[in-house]
Image (tube, rainbow, N blue to C red):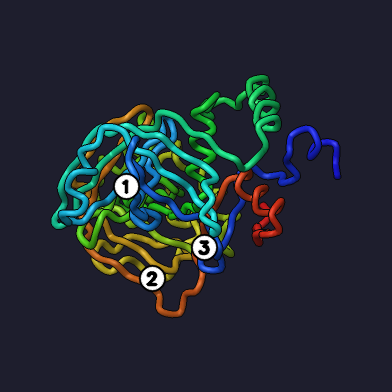
Amino acid sequence: MSIKKIITGLSVQQEYGCIDLLKFNTGLSVYLGVPNSSYSLDVTKNHLFLGYKPLIIGLVFPHDVTNSSVIYENQIHLHFKASDDKTLATLTLRRISQEIYGESTLVIYEGIRGTHKFLSGLHQFINRFRDSRKVRATGNVDLTGNLYDQVRIAYAIPRIIAVITVQDGKLMNMFPTDLHGPINDTHYIGSLRIGGMANEQVEQHKKIVLSLVNASGFKEVYGLGKNHMQPVQPPENFQTSEERSSVFSIPLPAMMNAYYELELDSSADIGIHRLHVYRIVNRYRNPDSSSCLSHVHQYYIQWREDHSLPLQILKR
Protein backbone atom coordinates (compact mmCIF):
# COMPACT_ATOMS: atom_id res chain seq x y z
CA MET A 1 0.00 0.00 0.00
CA SER A 2 1.40 3.39 -0.97
CA ILE A 3 2.04 6.23 1.48
CA LYS A 4 -0.53 8.34 -0.38
CA LYS A 5 -3.17 5.66 0.05
CA ILE A 6 -2.44 5.44 3.78
CA ILE A 7 -2.66 9.21 4.26
CA THR A 8 -5.49 10.14 1.89
CA GLY A 9 -7.34 6.86 1.35
CA LEU A 10 -6.84 7.37 -2.39
CA SER A 11 -4.99 5.21 -4.88
CA VAL A 12 -7.11 6.42 -7.82
CA GLN A 13 -5.16 9.18 -9.54
CA GLN A 14 -7.61 11.15 -11.68
CA GLU A 15 -10.30 13.27 -10.07
CA TYR A 16 -12.81 12.15 -12.72
CA GLY A 17 -12.65 8.80 -14.46
CA CYS A 18 -14.12 8.29 -17.92
CA ILE A 19 -16.17 5.13 -18.41
CA ASP A 20 -18.42 3.60 -21.04
CA LEU A 21 -21.89 3.95 -19.55
CA LEU A 22 -23.25 1.01 -21.55
CA LYS A 23 -20.64 -1.29 -19.99
CA PHE A 24 -21.35 -0.04 -16.46
CA ASN A 25 -23.31 -2.12 -13.94
CA THR A 26 -23.91 -2.57 -10.19
CA GLY A 27 -24.07 1.18 -9.66
CA LEU A 28 -25.77 3.16 -6.93
CA SER A 29 -29.50 3.82 -6.76
CA VAL A 30 -30.91 7.21 -5.73
CA TYR A 31 -33.97 7.50 -3.51
CA LEU A 32 -35.95 10.60 -2.66
CA GLY A 33 -36.80 10.99 1.01
CA VAL A 34 -38.65 13.60 3.05
CA PRO A 35 -37.46 14.71 6.54
CA ASN A 36 -39.32 13.02 9.42
CA SER A 37 -41.12 10.67 7.03
CA SER A 38 -40.77 7.12 5.76
CA TYR A 39 -41.55 8.29 2.22
CA SER A 40 -39.17 6.82 -0.38
CA LEU A 41 -39.19 7.05 -4.16
CA ASP A 42 -36.61 5.67 -6.60
CA VAL A 43 -35.42 8.65 -8.68
CA THR A 44 -32.27 7.08 -10.10
CA LYS A 45 -33.44 7.61 -13.67
CA ASN A 46 -35.36 10.85 -13.29
CA HIS A 47 -33.00 13.09 -11.37
CA LEU A 48 -30.85 15.53 -13.34
CA PHE A 49 -27.51 16.98 -12.23
CA LEU A 50 -27.56 20.57 -13.53
CA GLY A 51 -25.00 22.63 -11.62
CA TYR A 52 -22.14 22.59 -9.14
CA LYS A 53 -21.93 26.17 -7.71
CA PRO A 54 -24.38 25.87 -6.10
CA LEU A 55 -25.23 22.21 -6.50
CA ILE A 56 -28.38 22.08 -8.66
CA ILE A 57 -30.53 18.98 -9.01
CA GLY A 58 -33.69 18.68 -11.08
CA LEU A 59 -36.34 16.05 -10.36
CA VAL A 60 -38.86 15.10 -13.03
CA PHE A 61 -42.25 13.99 -11.72
CA PRO A 62 -45.02 12.60 -13.91
CA HIS A 63 -48.52 13.93 -13.35
CA ASP A 64 -49.28 11.26 -10.79
CA VAL A 65 -51.39 11.74 -7.70
CA THR A 66 -48.89 9.79 -5.57
CA ASN A 67 -46.32 12.56 -6.14
CA SER A 68 -48.66 15.52 -5.73
CA SER A 69 -47.56 16.39 -2.20
CA VAL A 70 -43.84 15.64 -2.33
CA ILE A 71 -43.20 18.21 -5.06
CA TYR A 72 -44.21 20.95 -2.61
CA GLU A 73 -41.82 19.86 0.14
CA ASN A 74 -39.37 22.69 0.83
CA GLN A 75 -36.61 20.29 1.88
CA ILE A 76 -35.84 16.78 0.69
CA HIS A 77 -33.06 14.18 0.88
CA LEU A 78 -31.50 12.15 -1.88
CA HIS A 79 -30.08 8.88 -0.55
CA PHE A 80 -27.43 7.14 -2.66
CA LYS A 81 -27.67 3.43 -1.92
CA ALA A 82 -25.50 0.43 -2.79
CA SER A 83 -26.93 -2.87 -4.01
CA ASP A 84 -27.16 -4.12 -0.41
CA ASP A 85 -29.49 -1.16 0.34
CA LYS A 86 -26.91 0.57 2.55
CA THR A 87 -26.90 4.35 2.22
CA LEU A 88 -23.43 5.53 1.16
CA ALA A 89 -24.24 9.20 0.72
CA THR A 90 -27.02 11.71 1.32
CA LEU A 91 -27.73 15.10 -0.23
CA THR A 92 -30.02 17.51 1.56
CA LEU A 93 -31.70 19.88 -0.90
CA ARG A 94 -34.06 22.84 -0.78
CA ARG A 95 -36.75 23.44 -3.38
CA ILE A 96 -36.35 26.66 -5.36
CA SER A 97 -38.71 26.41 -8.36
CA GLN A 98 -40.99 24.22 -10.40
CA GLU A 99 -42.40 24.28 -13.92
CA ILE A 100 -44.80 22.10 -15.88
CA TYR A 101 -43.73 20.76 -19.27
CA GLY A 102 -46.49 18.78 -20.92
CA GLU A 103 -47.18 15.75 -18.75
CA SER A 104 -44.17 16.34 -16.47
CA THR A 105 -43.37 18.63 -13.55
CA LEU A 106 -39.73 19.68 -13.20
CA VAL A 107 -38.73 20.73 -9.69
CA ILE A 108 -35.35 22.45 -9.22
CA TYR A 109 -33.45 22.04 -5.96
CA GLU A 110 -30.31 23.63 -4.52
CA GLY A 111 -27.87 21.71 -2.35
CA ILE A 112 -27.72 22.46 1.38
CA ARG A 113 -25.41 19.72 2.63
CA GLY A 114 -23.89 16.41 1.63
CA THR A 115 -22.48 13.52 3.67
CA HIS A 116 -20.88 10.32 2.39
CA LYS A 117 -18.98 7.17 3.34
CA PHE A 118 -16.89 6.74 0.18
CA LEU A 119 -13.81 7.38 2.32
CA SER A 120 -13.32 7.18 6.08
CA GLY A 121 -14.01 10.27 8.18
CA LEU A 122 -10.29 10.70 8.87
CA HIS A 123 -9.38 10.53 5.19
CA GLN A 124 -12.13 13.03 4.37
CA PHE A 125 -10.74 15.43 6.99
CA ILE A 126 -7.20 15.09 5.65
CA ASN A 127 -8.32 15.62 2.07
CA ARG A 128 -10.39 18.69 2.97
CA PHE A 129 -7.29 20.18 4.58
CA ARG A 130 -5.17 19.34 1.53
CA ASP A 131 -7.81 20.84 -0.79
CA SER A 132 -7.84 24.07 1.22
CA ARG A 133 -4.09 24.46 0.59
CA LYS A 134 -4.22 23.96 -3.17
CA VAL A 135 -3.65 26.82 -5.57
CA ARG A 136 -6.44 26.79 -8.14
CA ALA A 137 -5.68 27.26 -11.82
CA THR A 138 -6.92 30.53 -13.32
CA GLY A 139 -10.46 30.14 -14.63
CA ASN A 140 -11.25 27.05 -12.55
CA VAL A 141 -14.32 27.19 -10.32
CA ASP A 142 -13.33 27.05 -6.67
CA LEU A 143 -15.25 24.31 -4.84
CA THR A 144 -14.54 24.23 -1.13
CA GLY A 145 -15.80 22.65 2.06
CA ASN A 146 -19.11 20.84 2.00
CA LEU A 147 -20.00 22.11 -1.48
CA TYR A 148 -17.13 20.01 -2.81
CA ASP A 149 -18.54 16.97 -1.01
CA GLN A 150 -21.98 17.62 -2.51
CA VAL A 151 -20.44 17.64 -5.98
CA ARG A 152 -18.47 14.46 -5.28
CA ILE A 153 -21.70 12.75 -4.26
CA ALA A 154 -23.54 13.92 -7.37
CA TYR A 155 -20.77 12.48 -9.52
CA ALA A 156 -21.06 9.08 -7.84
CA ILE A 157 -23.71 8.50 -10.51
CA PRO A 158 -22.13 8.36 -14.00
CA ARG A 159 -22.86 11.61 -15.84
CA ILE A 160 -23.05 11.52 -19.62
CA ILE A 161 -20.54 13.79 -21.35
CA ALA A 162 -22.32 15.14 -24.42
CA VAL A 163 -21.02 17.47 -27.13
CA ILE A 164 -22.94 20.61 -28.10
CA THR A 165 -22.56 22.02 -31.61
CA VAL A 166 -23.57 25.57 -32.56
CA GLN A 167 -23.37 27.02 -36.06
CA ASP A 168 -22.91 30.61 -37.22
CA GLY A 169 -23.04 30.69 -41.01
CA LYS A 170 -19.94 28.86 -42.22
CA LEU A 171 -18.39 28.89 -38.74
CA MET A 172 -19.14 26.69 -35.73
CA ASN A 173 -18.18 25.72 -32.20
CA MET A 174 -18.22 22.38 -30.43
CA PHE A 175 -17.84 21.89 -26.66
CA PRO A 176 -18.61 19.24 -24.00
CA THR A 177 -21.22 19.34 -21.25
CA ASP A 178 -22.28 16.94 -18.50
CA LEU A 179 -24.94 19.16 -16.90
CA HIS A 180 -27.96 18.17 -18.94
CA GLY A 181 -30.77 15.68 -19.50
CA PRO A 182 -34.23 15.14 -20.96
CA ILE A 183 -37.27 16.38 -19.04
CA ASN A 184 -39.58 14.28 -21.21
CA ASP A 185 -40.18 13.56 -24.89
CA THR A 186 -40.74 17.22 -25.73
CA HIS A 187 -38.30 19.20 -23.58
CA TYR A 188 -34.62 19.04 -22.60
CA ILE A 189 -32.64 21.00 -20.00
CA GLY A 190 -28.98 21.85 -19.59
CA SER A 191 -26.83 24.52 -17.99
CA LEU A 192 -23.84 26.55 -19.12
CA ARG A 193 -21.60 28.89 -17.19
CA ILE A 194 -22.70 32.52 -17.18
CA GLY A 195 -20.14 34.69 -18.96
CA GLY A 196 -18.76 31.88 -21.11
CA MET A 197 -18.61 32.24 -24.87
CA ALA A 198 -20.36 28.88 -25.24
CA ASN A 199 -23.36 30.23 -23.36
CA GLU A 200 -23.38 33.41 -25.46
CA GLN A 201 -23.32 31.37 -28.67
CA VAL A 202 -26.23 29.19 -27.58
CA GLU A 203 -28.28 32.24 -26.64
CA GLN A 204 -27.44 33.99 -29.90
CA HIS A 205 -28.20 31.13 -32.28
CA LYS A 206 -30.82 29.26 -30.17
CA LYS A 207 -30.67 26.11 -32.32
CA ILE A 208 -28.13 23.51 -31.20
CA VAL A 209 -27.30 19.85 -31.57
CA LEU A 210 -26.48 17.90 -28.41
CA SER A 211 -24.67 14.66 -29.30
CA LEU A 212 -23.96 11.59 -27.21
CA VAL A 213 -20.61 10.14 -28.20
CA ASN A 214 -18.64 6.89 -28.19
CA ALA A 215 -16.48 6.34 -25.13
CA SER A 216 -13.48 5.71 -27.41
CA GLY A 217 -13.46 9.46 -28.19
CA PHE A 218 -12.90 10.47 -24.56
CA LYS A 219 -9.55 12.21 -25.15
CA GLU A 220 -10.91 14.23 -28.06
CA VAL A 221 -14.01 15.24 -26.08
CA TYR A 222 -12.02 16.38 -23.05
CA GLY A 223 -9.84 18.34 -25.46
CA LEU A 224 -12.91 20.31 -26.54
CA GLY A 225 -13.29 21.76 -23.05
CA LYS A 226 -11.29 24.87 -23.95
CA ASN A 227 -13.94 25.79 -26.53
CA HIS A 228 -16.28 27.01 -23.80
CA MET A 229 -14.22 30.21 -24.02
CA GLN A 230 -13.49 30.22 -27.77
CA PRO A 231 -15.21 32.02 -30.66
CA VAL A 232 -16.78 30.16 -33.56
CA GLN A 233 -14.23 28.65 -35.94
CA PRO A 234 -14.02 27.00 -39.37
CA PRO A 235 -15.35 23.40 -39.46
CA GLU A 236 -11.92 22.05 -40.43
CA ASN A 237 -10.74 22.87 -36.90
CA PHE A 238 -12.98 20.08 -35.58
CA GLN A 239 -13.32 16.34 -36.05
CA THR A 240 -16.74 16.19 -37.67
CA SER A 241 -18.82 13.45 -39.22
CA GLU A 242 -19.69 13.46 -42.90
CA GLU A 243 -23.31 13.58 -41.75
CA ARG A 244 -25.17 16.67 -40.57
CA SER A 245 -28.19 16.87 -38.32
CA SER A 246 -31.33 16.11 -40.26
CA VAL A 247 -33.39 19.24 -39.44
CA PHE A 248 -30.91 22.05 -38.66
CA SER A 249 -28.10 20.71 -40.90
CA ILE A 250 -25.56 21.39 -38.15
CA PRO A 251 -22.20 19.53 -38.16
CA LEU A 252 -21.95 16.49 -35.88
CA PRO A 253 -18.93 15.21 -33.95
CA ALA A 254 -17.14 12.31 -35.62
CA MET A 255 -17.69 10.08 -32.59
CA MET A 256 -21.47 10.75 -32.42
CA ASN A 257 -23.76 7.82 -31.59
CA ALA A 258 -26.98 9.74 -30.93
CA TYR A 259 -28.15 13.34 -31.00
CA TYR A 260 -30.90 15.76 -30.09
CA GLU A 261 -31.76 18.80 -32.19
CA LEU A 262 -32.83 21.42 -29.67
CA GLU A 263 -34.31 24.91 -29.86
CA LEU A 264 -33.92 27.29 -26.92
CA ASP A 265 -37.22 27.95 -25.16
CA SER A 266 -36.44 29.68 -21.83
CA SER A 267 -33.58 30.39 -19.41
CA ALA A 268 -32.99 31.09 -15.71
CA ASP A 269 -29.91 31.89 -13.61
CA ILE A 270 -28.81 30.05 -10.48
CA GLY A 271 -25.37 30.88 -9.09
CA ILE A 272 -22.76 30.73 -11.84
CA HIS A 273 -25.10 28.71 -14.08
CA ARG A 274 -27.66 29.65 -16.69
CA LEU A 275 -30.24 26.89 -17.02
CA HIS A 276 -31.58 26.55 -20.55
CA VAL A 277 -34.79 24.68 -21.35
CA TYR A 278 -35.03 23.54 -24.96
CA ARG A 279 -37.81 22.21 -27.12
CA ILE A 280 -36.85 18.86 -28.66
CA VAL A 281 -37.16 19.24 -32.43
CA ASN A 282 -35.69 15.88 -33.43
CA ARG A 283 -33.91 12.86 -31.96
CA TYR A 284 -31.64 10.33 -33.63
CA ARG A 285 -29.88 7.22 -32.35
CA ASN A 286 -27.45 5.10 -34.33
CA PRO A 287 -28.92 1.57 -34.05
CA ASP A 288 -25.44 0.07 -34.31
CA SER A 289 -24.04 2.04 -31.39
CA SER A 290 -23.18 0.26 -28.16
CA SER A 291 -21.14 2.91 -26.34
CA CYS A 292 -21.74 6.14 -24.41
CA LEU A 293 -19.09 8.35 -22.82
CA SER A 294 -19.64 9.34 -19.20
CA HIS A 295 -17.55 9.98 -16.10
CA VAL A 296 -17.63 9.47 -12.34
CA HIS A 297 -15.77 10.98 -9.40
CA GLN A 298 -12.58 9.62 -7.90
CA TYR A 299 -14.15 9.04 -4.46
CA TYR A 300 -16.79 6.67 -5.79
CA ILE A 301 -14.24 4.89 -7.98
CA GLN A 302 -12.06 4.45 -4.88
CA TRP A 303 -14.98 3.07 -2.86
CA ARG A 304 -15.61 0.51 -5.59
CA GLU A 305 -11.96 -0.54 -5.68
CA ASP A 306 -11.91 -0.87 -1.89
CA HIS A 307 -14.97 -3.14 -2.13
CA SER A 308 -13.66 -5.28 -5.01
CA LEU A 309 -15.96 -3.65 -7.57
CA PRO A 310 -13.39 -2.12 -9.91
CA LEU A 311 -14.38 -0.02 -12.93
CA GLN A 312 -12.80 -0.06 -16.36
CA ILE A 313 -11.47 3.49 -16.41
CA LEU A 314 -10.32 5.08 -19.66
CA LYS A 315 -6.95 6.62 -18.82
CA ARG A 316 -6.49 10.17 -20.08
Q: Name the residue under label 2.
A: 243
Q: Nearer the viewer, residue 201 or 217?
A: 217
Tell me which label, 3 or 2, sits earlier in the chain: 3
Number of residues whose C-alpha sits closer than 10 Å to that of mark 1, classed few (under 14), some (14–19) or many (20 or more)? few
Q: Mark 1 points at which residue?
A: 39
Q: In this view, does 170 lie to the left or right of 128?
A: left
Callout 1 amino acid? Tyr
Secondary structure type for disc 2: strand
Tell me which label, 1 or 2, sits earlier in the chain: 1
Callout 2 amino acid? Glu
Q: Name the residue under label 3.
A: 21
Residue furthest toward the top? 133
Q: Nearer the viewer, residue 222 or 60?
A: 60
Number of residues whose C-alpha sits closer than 10 Å to that of mark 2, classed few (under 14), some (14–19) or many (20 or more)? few
Callout 3 amino acid? Leu
Number of the label disc, if any, that sits on residue 295: none
Locate residue 238, reporting x and y percent.
49, 55
